[in-house]
Amino acid sequence: MPHFATFCLDREKDIVIDLDREGGRLRYTLRTPNHSTGNLITNLAAITGHPLTKDESGLKVMTGTIPCHIDGENRRIYMFRLGQTKVANIYDDGRIERRASIPAIAKTLMSQTTDYNLSYYQTLVKTFIPAECKFRTDLHTHMNGNLPPDILIALGIFHRIRYPLYYVKKLGLDLTEAMRGELSERRAEAEKRFRGGDLKGKYLTRRIDDNTFIDFSELILGNLENAAENISKIRNSLAVMKDGQAVFADLEKVYIYRYVFARGVPMDGVSDAFTERFAPEEAALFAKVPDSDVASALAQMALDSENESFKGFKLYENALLWIARNYAGCGVSYAEISDTNLAKRAAAPALLERIHAAMPAITKETGVTLRFLAALRRIPLLIGPDQNEKKSHLAENLAVLKGVAGDPYVAGSDIVGEEANDIRELSGEIAEITKIAADHPSFVLRIHAGENDALTENVANAVLAVKESLAPGQAFPRMRIGHGLYTPNLKSKKGAALIKLLKDNGVALEFQLTSNVRLNNLSHLDRHPLPEYLSCGISCVQGTDGGALYGTNSIDEELSLERMVGLSQSELMKMKAAEDRIYDASMLSFSEKMTAFKAAFNASGAASVADFYGEKIGSEDAELLSGASAAPQLPASEALAAYVRPLPQGKLPVIVLGGSFNSDRHKTRMKASGKAFIDALLGAADPEKVFFVIGHRASAYEKYLAQEAKGRFEVFSFVPSLVTPREAQKLAALEIGVRISKEPVGMGLYKSFYYEIFKRRPSGVIALDANASGMNVIQDARNSRFKSSIFLYEGSADLKGKAKTLSGYVRTFKGGEDAAAVAAALNG
């Protein structure tokens, strides 16, 4: 039958519906092309009561006929339903009105289990929000996560960015013979530049491939026969993984793929200005791009290049324009975007000049005001044994922040990055930011805290760090906590103290539901603390966390709060009231700061905004306060040098979690059933076939296993690059092998398990206790392309809950009676 149209049930184009028409009949085929396990479509079919079939390639699909109706104006309308929900109205002229969608949260949880347990009501969501409680801000988002992949691809084409050969290879993109020949010649030239250096083997290959480029517009427009498949592969690289929950390390990889576009550099000889970029015959190819969203964006970019307001825009300005357009499309009129470049001396002055030049026209067209939070990264601030170097680096960030804090487009600051450290370690930096806020009363001080369950005191300690830094008579600044998901039990004494601390100081909490789920920080939506915060009178608002990364936007997030968390309309109205207070204050701040900036700029005699801020930043000299005292740390490569050795080959590595990966809410306390399991496991496992891997603390079950296995099994500990003397002594006393991670803190060790084990070989995981970092080890094992046998202890409530979300991929055990079966699976 002739193809009629295609549409999708999700924002990432993972649930695709192809429509074919023959005569008066309209048939559909629903497929999930980016999900290899088949879990997504299988669970969707089960929850909607729809049978599955297979297409000619053997892939699972859902098919059927869509009934036709005649409305009161004698128009033919095809009403497409799944289960009892109308998904779309389809008209004879090709128009499609989508009436329901599948949120990214539901899609993720359906993808990673064979036993999906969210309700039908939570899965197929009608896209309607009462007007009176519709949110109009995005107060928690990130610069390079805002734009959907299709817009990034269109920007890459239109601005003719250079695209590295490394990604061409990594994604398996199809090229023409001419392209392959041209890239081969360019690679040979790049190889000459790097030959004879220190890099060897795969590291040299990567460097050469990273510096061999193809014109991205040529990759797509000059290769239209392969464009559909290439665009699909590139699109998938610009969002977090599809077939299950990701971990923070996966997010870091996605950002690297996004930087190629978000920070794109034009090919040599190509101007980055809008004008004269494409000849008319080249621009005519825009309409032939085999993706309607990419083609539509390119057509609009061509129109923009003729618009007097936009024709001078380069890639960065054009990205801001499309960020604002996307916000306008979902009813958001104000956003605050975290950007680390605004805390860098080399980048901030030029960026602010470009923002000042572009934003008036952008706001005039879209009605959207974009402002920024100058962001400091929490993990790079801590790494490296040279503390003076660390302080020098931070002093520069803080000096830049002091210099730009008065700019109208700078709303405040942010502390970002994976929450792998106690926030008190940054108390000196927080004190300096609090000083800055004293000079700028509207300055927003936002800290990422409470995103995972490892450091539940971070939310309270972040607020206390600000409170303790206030100068005499200084009002508490406008503070917001990004995430605030994990804290002490709000009904406990500590929880009550936290509620009082937040209320007394007017601290607002920002919630990003989809990113919490997709980054493996939240699997059980019924445990979300938001309703309790609202009932206690805490100001709570919504963000997207860079929604395009997670297949969501402001509307989908609000619908998810209603459907997934179960917020009532009155609770949404409380959030709307909190948002309105922040919005009104922020817009007033913007107006007042713009007036002050214009006066200061005119008085300065500076030739440009960049010169103005270059001089201001150069005159600043931030002095760091001393942070909270921490245990002294030693380079692990020195303290444990005698125990470092490679992992054995020819044996199965079995990671045991139970001591190193407990949260600050509790220490792992061994149970008799857990010890009995280890005893029985060591008796049944084969030391010729398996060896064990533990974490860096060598405590509880991990220490017990290492002691009991001594002389029979090889045992290795993965340790961070910096360890305390006590940790080093405990490991040395066990006399086990050591592998040293590049990560400076224990919370980041899961990344080394991935790179040294899951990425390279089959494995086993036995979890007796685990916090967020341990859950990431489990998730990485499940996501591994090599088989990993995963066993979770029923004696841990958290692990038992995790097992439900990974049904079909993990097994549970109770005690020693289950050890023989576990050992048999590990022995092979």
Image: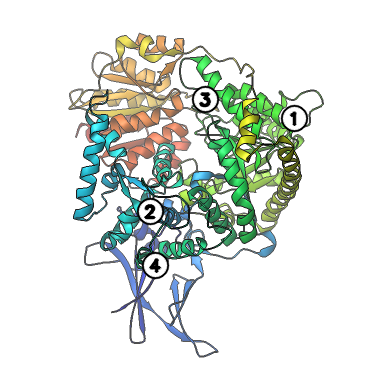
- Where is residue 576 shown, x and y percent of the image? 69, 53
Q: Is residue 63 above or below residue 341?
A: below
Give whichever of 571, 739 is nearer the camera.
739
What distance separates the C-alpha of mark 3 from that of mark 2? 32 Å
Outermost right residue? 473
User: Which SS class for mark 3?
Assistant: loop
Which kind of residue does numbered mark 3 sit on? Leu
User: Which SS class for mark 2?
Assistant: helix
Which kind of residue does numbered mark 4 sit on? Gly
Give whichever of 440, 452 is nearer the camera.
440
User: Which SS class for mark 4?
Assistant: loop
**Number of marks drawn:** 4
User: Which SS class for mark 1?
Assistant: helix
What distance separates the C-alpha of mark 1 from that of mark 3? 23 Å
In the picture, the disc for residue 235 is 2
Closer to the N terminus: mark 3 or mark 4?
4
Closer to the N terminus: mark 1 or mark 3?
3
**Left-right relation of 689 to 145:** left
In the picture, the disc for residue 438 is 1
- Where is residue 567 shown, x and y percent of the image? 62, 54
Q: Are marks 3 and 4 in contact (CB under 8 Å)?
A: no
Residue identified by numbered label 3: 381
What distance separates the C-alpha of mark 1 from that of mark 2? 44 Å
Q: Is residue 553 above or below residue 455?
A: below
Q: Nearer the viewer, mark 1 or mark 4?
A: 1
Residue identified by numbered label 4: 49
What distance separates the C-alpha of mark 2 from that of mark 4? 31 Å
